[in-house]
Amino acid sequence: MSDNAISVAPDILTRGNDVPSTYVVNLSDYGINTPVRISKHGDILAVGQRYELTNVHLVNLSTHSTQPWLPMGEGQNEAYSIDNLSINSHGEISAFDFETGKLHRCNPSSLSRSTTPPLTLANTAIHLSAVQGDNFVISTGLYEQGRYRYYSLEDESEEYFIDYPVHPGYPDLSPYSTSILWASTVLSLRPDNQMFVCTDIRSGQIDFCRIEGKKISLACRHCYYYPHVDARDKGDVRVAYYSDNITGFRDVTVSDDRVFVLYSGKTYKDEKQNIANCSTLLVFDWEGTLLETRTLPQMATFISYDMEENALYGTTPDAQLVRYNI
C-alpha cells in the first residue's frame, strides 16, 4: 500500500508544553520491576505484572505494604495474564484475564478484603479486553458481529455494536481477519457509565462511544493513521506487522470530563522494546475534541487517573510511580 496510508496526522505530532512530575514511590521496593497496567484509587495502587507468580500487587501507599492478588494458575481466583485493570468509585478492582475470559474482582479497601467470584464472559467468542460497569460489561475481541460487545449483568443478554475501521490497504478483508487486525485495544469507562473510550495500541485509531440503555453508539472516531501490516484471509497468521509500523496509543485513562491518552510514535525497528516508553500525552474531551498535546519529560509506560484525588499518575520506564502535574 502507499506510504500515505500510514502517514501520521500532524495533530498528534505537535510538541506541547512540558508536564512536570512529582516522584511518589519506587515500585521496585515492592518487588515490581516491570508493571503492565496500573489503576489508582486513593491510597490503593493496583499494579499488574506479567510472567510472575502473582499477577497483581495491591500496594497501600499509606502503610507502605503490599497484598498479592491473582496468583498464576487456572483456579477460581487465579489468572494467567491480566489486562484492563480498573477501580470503580467504590474501590472495587477489576482485572480481565483474556486467556480464560474471566473478569476478576475484589475490594481491598473493605474490612474483609472481600473477593467477588470471577465473572466468565460466556459463549465461544474469544474476548481480548473487558471493563465492567455498574450492571454491564463492555468487551472487545475476535468478534465478527461488531467491534464492541455489551453484556448485561442483569439478564445475561449480549449484543454487538459498531463496525470496525476500514483499512485503506485491505477494504475487503473478511470480518474475522478484520477483528484480528483491530485486536490491540485498551478500554476505559467514564465514571458515570454513560461513555467509554477505546484506543488501538498498534496504530492511530481511537473511538469515543456512548452507552444508552443496552445500546452502544459511536460518538466520534479518529483515524490518525493506519497500521503497516500484511493482512490476509487464510493461513495461521492472518495479520503480520512490519517492524517499521508506528506504535500508537499505549494506554488511556479518564476522568468525568477528560480522556488522557499515551502516544508512543515509535517503531520496533528503531526502538525495540522501548516502544512502550511514551513522551506524548494527548488530552481530549468526551466529544472527541483534541484539547491539548503535552510532552512528558519524565516518560510514562502506563497511566491512571485517580478519581478520589482528581490527579493523573503514571509509571516510568524504571518502575517509578510519579504524579503528573497537569
Image (cartoon, helix red, strand yellow):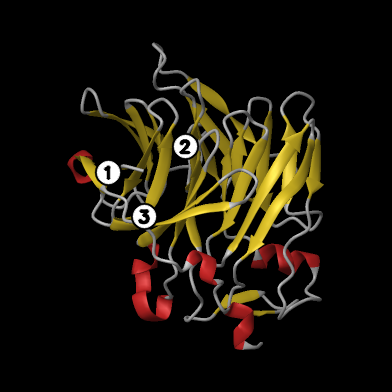
Q: Amino acid at mark 2?
A: Glu
Label 1 residue SS: strand
Q: Is residue 163 above or below residue 38?
A: below
Q: Quadrant of the N terminus?
A: bottom right
Q: Amino acid at mark 1?
A: Val
The answer to which quarter of the image holds residue 268 is: bottom left
Q: Residue furthest top?
A: 111
Q: Residue furthest bottom?
A: 2
Q: Are marks 2 and 1 in contact (CB under 8 Å)?
A: no
Q: Position of residue 82 (x, y in %)?
A: 47, 45
Q: Are marks 1 and 3 in contact (CB under 8 Å)?
A: no
Measure the C-alpha gap from mark 3 to mark 2.
25 Å
Q: Amino acid at mark 3?
A: Thr
The answer to whether residue 216 is seen in the rendering is: yes
Q: Nearer the viewer, mark 3 or mark 2?
A: 3
Label 2 residue SS: loop
Q: Position of residue 300 (x, y in %)?
A: 34, 54
Q: Which residue is mark 3?
A: 301
Q: Nearer the viewer, mark 1 or mark 3?
A: 1
Q: Quadrant of the C terminus?
A: top left
Q: Position of residue 295 (x, y in %)?
A: 35, 58
Label number found at residue 322: 1
Measure the C-alpha gap from mark 2 to mark 1.
29 Å
Label 3 residue SS: loop
The answer to whether residue 32 is seen in the rendering is: no
Disc on the earlier residue, 2 or 1: 2
**Residue visible at 59% across and 87% down?**
3
Q: Which residue is mark 2?
A: 78
Out of 284 and 24, give the one closest to the viewer: 284
